[in-house]
Amino acid sequence: MIKLYRYPLSGHSHRVELMLSLLGVPAELVLVDLKQGAHKTSEFLTTLNSFGQVPVIDDNGVVLADSNAILVYLAGKYGNPQWLPTEPSALARVQRWLSAAAGPLHTGPAAARLITVFGAALDAETTITRSHGFLNVVEQQLRQSRFLSGDLPTIADIAHYTYIAHAPEGNVSLNDYSQVRAWLGSIEALPGFVGMQRTAVGLAKA
């Protein structure tokens, strides 16, 4: 059975947990207590992830870190071509959004949430402004296709879902993005969907 080393409020961890659930792949969830610095211990750094981050998976001795890399692995090993297409143009469209997940999603909605949920020393106004700039791009894309890279969900959607769904926890409203909200509903309607725990901040702003 796959072991998933994760923290319940980590959006990167939830990407992997969601993908595993959608694929119907059983996994043992192993808590890494970020508050206690468990991800910075010598054992964690040596055996799991030298960057000191979650998530990490151990698939019968195959140890992988980085949520997007793990999504690629899971889709390739356990999924069907829908999740990670092999046709070059379709694959490139997925990769474009994986790059966006590591770029403007990370510096926008994810960063805004880091401030309110984890107390990150970042500028809230800047991250919220970036978030809306990014969400406008996503909204425009979703006016052209049901999912980010086409008419079927791929790992590109899974890479974006959590931080966009939980953007209000970082004071980033989704009220102006009807297509984004519809897309979130489409992801949540997928068989096997599992949500991420919401924080008290998120519940207060829901």
Image (cartoon, rainbow, N blue to C red):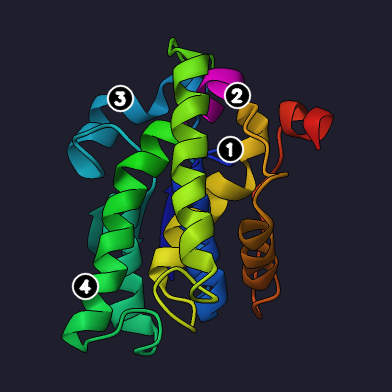
Between marks 3 and 4 in the image, the one whose residue lies nearer the viewer: 4
In this picture, residue 104 sits left or right of residue 25: left
**Closer to the camera, 4 or 203?**
203
Q: Secondary structure at mark 3?
A: loop
Indicate the quadrant containing the C terminus: top left, top right, bottom left or bottom right: top right
Cβ atoms at labels 2 and 4 below 8 Å apart? no
| Residue named by callout 1 | 9
| Residue named by callout 3 | 41
The three-letter amino acid code for the residue at tag 1 is: Leu
Q: Earlier in the sequence, mark 1 or mark 2?
A: 1
How far apart marks 3 and 4 lie (CA) works out to: 37 Å
In this picture, residue 5 sits left or right of residue 97: right
| Residue named by callout 4 | 92
Crowd class of label 3 (few under 14; some 14 to 19; many from 20; radius 10 Å): few
| Residue drawn where x is 54% and y is 21% of the image | 118
Look at the image and give the residue range highlighted in magenta.
111-118
| Residue drawn where x is 71% and y is 32% of the image | 199
Q: Secondary structure at mark 4?
A: helix
